[in-house]
Amino acid sequence: VQLQASGGGLVQAGGSLRLSCAASGFISAINVMGWYRQAPGNQRELVAQITREGSTDYADSVKGRFTISRDDAKNTVYLQMGSLRPEDTAVYYCKAERTTATYIAYWGKGTQVTVSS
């Protein structure tokens, strides 16, 4: 499975960005996709994830501001980010997981999101 993330950039506080993660390869085995982020000096943390059935989960810090969605026809997961804050600045990574049978996880290359105050 290959993951291609895009959509990062520089935005002012209060602004919006949409990240995209396009998956290719043996994606039929994947049942969870998510976005993580890592700021300098911090551990990588979950931002949001979505299951094949459409169930979503969000970090408390982004609830009400970010929305994760998926387009199965395009094998793409999106993260719509709104009301951005400087503390949202981080490298954002896409992750795909198979949580049934043998656990497997795939990571995409990160995309930088910078929010200026």
Image: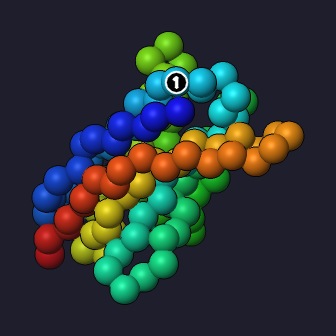
Question: Which residue appears farthest toward the right when viewing the image?
Answer: 101
The x and y percentages for residue 18 are 30, 42
Left or right relative to 9: residue 56: right
Where residue 112 appears, x then y in whole percent? 25, 59
Residue 13 appears anywhere in the view: no
Residue depicted at 76% across the width and 48% down the height: 103
Quadrant housing the C terminus: bottom left
Q: Residue at x 48, y 59 (%)?
A: 36
Quarter of the view holding residue 14: bottom left
Label 1 residue SS:
loop
Left or right of 18: which side holds 52? right
Closer to us: 6 or 64 = 6
Q: Is residue 31 left or right of residue 12?
A: right
Q: Kindly identify the residue that appears in the image at 23 percent across and 50 percent down.
A: 8
Q: How are the residues colored?
A: rainbow
Which one is in front, 10 or 32? 32
Give coordinates of residue 50: x percent, y percent: 61, 42
Q: Which residue is mark 1?
A: 25
Q: Residue at x 70, y 28 (%)?
A: 29
Amino acid type indicated by mark 1: Gly
**Where 8 sits versus 88, above or below?**
above
Q: Nearer the viewer, residue 73 or 14?
A: 73
Does residue 7 appear left or right of residue 54 in this picture?
left
Residue 110 in view in this figure? yes
Count of numbered labels shown in the rendering: 1
Name the residue at the top extreme. 73
Label 1 Cα crowd, 10 Å radius (few <14 / some 14-19 / many 20+): few
Question: Quick check: 89 above or below 101?
Answer: below
Residue 7 x, y percent position in the rendering: 25, 43
Q: Work out whether 42 lies above or below 89.
A: below
